Image (cartoon, coloured by chain):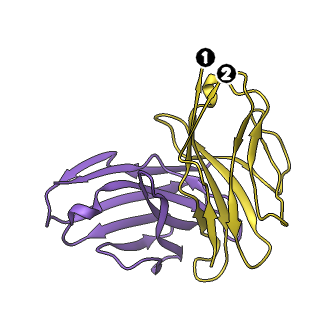
Chain colours: A yellow, B purple
């Protein structure tokens, strides 16, 4: 079954500390993985996707097929990074290109 | 540029009343359209998706239905709302055959 698991509901860190939001997936093919972010009172928006291999707002994520993981990392957290983060998988089959989302992790960065 | 609209932004409805939420997309043609429900602690649940006018696929059995009367219009409906229908409903679109989706601002539905 296709599934995305984000084990942490809440991650609290201090400003300047490293951040790692965990994401594991289950998929029986070649997945496309995404990280979406929802800041307070804003729309859910794409943060990054694994195929682009770019760093957005200091965040990076590497697809590890051996560990079936796509963890989101940032070396130095900022207060403006506080948001809800969703890991998502692009699946196939009945839902076409519909995304399968994890339950989300709330990141709270305090000074 | 492409934009996606949803309305209303918030809605409070009594149990047993009907529901109609509307989503429209501008600036693109033949998009895939999606309805999700976002619940606290449960993430985003895909409810319906559509790859064309009149083509609706349901991901989970429920008290809701969806329709796509026009290429860029997607409607979420219910004949009789249940308490469990309360939640935050998101509409999204994507270019066909790509995984990236673009989300609307959402509708907060409270059923009392």
Graded by Cα atoms within 10 Å as few (under 14), some (14 to 19) or many (20 or more), the crowding at tag 1 reads few
- Residue at x 28% of width, y 74% of height: B63
Establish if A40 lies above or below A9. above
Residue assigned mark 2: A15
Which quadrant would residue B83 be assigned to in this image?
bottom left
- Residue at x 49% of width, y 34% of height: A40
- Residue at x 61% of width, y 26% of height: A80
Label 2: element kind: loop
Expressed as whole percent of the image width and height from the top left, the position of residue A5 reads 62, 61
Label 1: element kind: loop
Graded by Cα atoms within 10 Å as few (under 14), some (14 to 19) or many (20 or more), the crowding at tag 2 reads some
Residue at mark 2: chain: A
Establish if A33 lies above or below B57. above
Q: Is residue B29 visible?
A: no
The answer to which of B77 and A109 lies nearer the viewer is A109
CB within 8 Å, label 1 to label 2? yes
Q: Earlier in the sequence, mark 1 or mark 2?
A: 2
Expressed as whole percent of the image width and height from the top left, the position of residue A19 reads 71, 36
Q: How many marks?
A: 2
Q: Quadrant of the C terminus of chain A?
A: top right
Q: Marks 1 and 2, how far apart in space?
A: 5 Å
Establish if A57 lies above or below B69. above
Which quadrant would residue B10 be assigned to in this image?
top left
Which quadrant would residue A31 be assigned to in this image?
bottom right
Residue assigned mark 1: A111
Expressed as whole percent of the image width and height from the top left, the position of residue B62 reads 33, 76
- Residue at x 43% of width, y 72% of height: B68
Q: Quick check: do tags 1 and 2 share a chain? A: yes
Q: Is residue A80 visible?
A: yes
Expressed as whole percent of the image width and height from the top left, the position of residue A87 reads 64, 54
């Amino acid at each position: 079954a296709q599934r995305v698991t984000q084990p942490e509901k809440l991650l609290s860190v201090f400003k300047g500390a490293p951040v790692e939001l965990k994401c594991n997936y289950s998929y029986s093919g070649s997945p496309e993985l995404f990280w979406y972010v929802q800041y307070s009172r804003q729309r859910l928006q794409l943060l990054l996707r694994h195929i682009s291999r770019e760093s957005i707002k200091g965040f990076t994520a590497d697809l590890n097929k051996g560990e079936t993981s796509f963890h989101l990392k940032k070396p130095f957290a900022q207060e403006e990074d506080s948001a809800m983060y969703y890991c998502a998988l692009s699946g196939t089959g009945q839902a076409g290109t519909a995304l399968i989302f994890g339950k989300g992790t709330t990141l709270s960065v305090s000074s | 540029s492409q934009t996606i609209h949803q309305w209303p932004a918030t809605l409070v409805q009594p149990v047993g009343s009907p529901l109609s939420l509307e989503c429209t997309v501008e600036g693109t043609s033949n998009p895939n359209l999606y309805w999700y429900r976002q619940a606290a602690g449960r993430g985003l649940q895909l409810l319906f998706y559509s790859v064309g006018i009149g083509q609706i696929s349901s991901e989970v059995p429920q008290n809701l239905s969806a329709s796509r009367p026009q290429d860029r219009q997607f409607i979420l409906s219910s004949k009789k709302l249940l308490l469990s229908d309360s939640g935050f409903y998101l509409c999204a679109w994507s270019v066909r055959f790509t995984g990236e989706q673009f989300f609307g601002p959402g509708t907060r539905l409270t059923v009392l």
